[in-house]
Image (tube, rainbow, N blue to C red):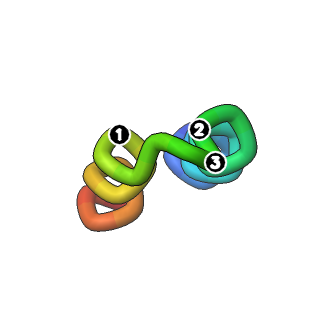
Amino acid sequence: RGGYAGRGKKRSASPGSGAPPKKNFKTT
């Protein structure tokens, strides 16, 4: 559950940054 929420939050928070969200996506 935590990973799912964090993923969406990071995606919305870092729209221009593709490095942090991309890593989270791959890890999740």
Kind of residue indicated by mark 2: Ser
Say whether disc 2 or disc 1 marks the residue closer to the N-terminus: 2
Residue 25 appears at what percent x and percent y? 39, 61
Between 22 and 7, the residue placed more toward the observer is 22
> Which residue is farthest bottom?
26
Determine whether, in the image, residue 18 is placed left or right of residue 11. left
In the depicted structure, whether residue 21 falls above or below residue 13: below
Q: How many marks?
A: 3
Horizontal placement of 5 versus 25: left or right?
right
- Between 16 and 28, the one lying in front of the other is 16
* Contact, mark 2 vs mark 1 (Cβ under 8 Å): yes
Q: Is residue 1 among the parts visible in the rendering?
A: no
Q: Residue at x 73, y 45 (%)?
A: 12
Residues at marks 2 and 1, CA–CA distance in whole angstroms: 8 Å
Q: Does the CB distance between marks 2 and 3 fall below 8 Å?
A: yes
Name the image quarter holding residue 27: bottom left
Q: Could you tell me which secondary element the residue under label 1 belongs to?
A: helix
Disc assigned to residue 3: none
User: Within 10 Å of the Cα at label 1, are there few (<14), some (14-19), or many (20+) other Cα atoms?
Assistant: few
Amino acid type at image mark 3:
Pro
**In this rendering, which labeled residue sits more in front, label 3 or label 1?**
3
**Residue at label 3?**
15
> Depth check: 22 or 8 in front?
22
Q: Secondary structure at mark 3?
A: loop
Q: Residue 28: x, y in percent?
A: 37, 60
* Residue position marked by numbered label 2 in the rendering: 14
- Residue position marked by numbered label 1 in the rendering: 20
Tell me if residue 17 can be seen: yes
Q: Residues within 10 Å of mark 3 (few under 14, many from 20)?
A: few
